[in-house]
Image: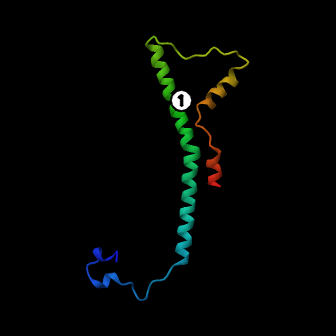
Amino acid sequence: MAVRPFAEHESQMTAPKAGFQINPDRLKKQVIYFTVTAQIVNFALEVVVPYVKRSAFRKVKEVRADRAAKRGGAAEIADDHPDEKAFLARVRDEAELDLYDVTTDFREM
C-alpha cells in the first residue's frame, strides 16, 4: 500500500467505519467559490494585466525618450500630417499590442 510508509500503526491504515458523510451544501458552496474565483482570475489575466502592461511599457518608453533627449540623442517624434495624426496614433498603439490568437478563444469556449 502507498500509505504504509507514512502510517505509525495499523489503525491509521483502515478507513473509519461510520461517521463520514458528504455535506452537499458545503460541496455546492465550494464549487461556486472556485468557479467565481476562476472567473475573476481569468478576467484579471485577460483584461487587467494587458492594460497595466501596456501602460507600464508606454511609461518606460516615455522615460527612455526623455533621457535620450536630455543626453542629446535623437527624439522619436514623428512629424505627421494633421489630418492623419489621430489615425496614426491609434495604429501605433495597436501595433504595440500582443498578437491575437483565435484558437485561444475557441479553446476557452
Please, which residue is most extreme toward the top here?
Answer: 72
Name the residue: 53% across, 63% down: 34
Q: Quadrant of residue 12?
A: bottom left
Question: Residue 89, position in %: x, y?
Answer: 65, 25
Q: Quadrant of residue 54?
A: top right
Q: Nearer the viewer, residue 41 or 13?
A: 13
What amino acid is labelled 1 in the image? Arg
- In the picture of the structure, the residue carrying the numbered disc 1 is 58
Decide: few, some or many residues near mark 1? Use Cα within 10 Å; few <14, some 14-19, many ≥20. Answer: some
Q: Nearer the viewer, residue 104 or 34?
A: 104
> Does 8 sit left or right of 100 as displayed?
left
55 w.r.t. 39: above or below? above
Please, which residue is most extreme toward the bottom here?
Answer: 17
Q: Quadrant of the N terminus?
A: bottom left
Q: Quadrant of the C terminus?
A: bottom right
Please, which residue is most extreme toward the front here?
Answer: 1
15 w.r.t. 97: above or below? below
> Does 90 sit left or right of 54 as displayed?
right
Question: Residue 96, position in %: x, y?
Answer: 58, 31
108 w.r.t. 83: above or below? below
51 w.r.t. 86: above or below? below
> Does 2 sit left or right of 102 as displayed?
left
- Per the image, label 1 sits on a secondary structure element best described as helix
Question: Residue 27, position in %: x, y?
Answer: 53, 73
Q: Quadrant of residue 102?
A: top right
Name the residue: 33% across, 76% down: 3
> Does 8 sit left or right of 60 as displayed?
left
Please, which residue is most extreme toward the right here?
Answer: 83
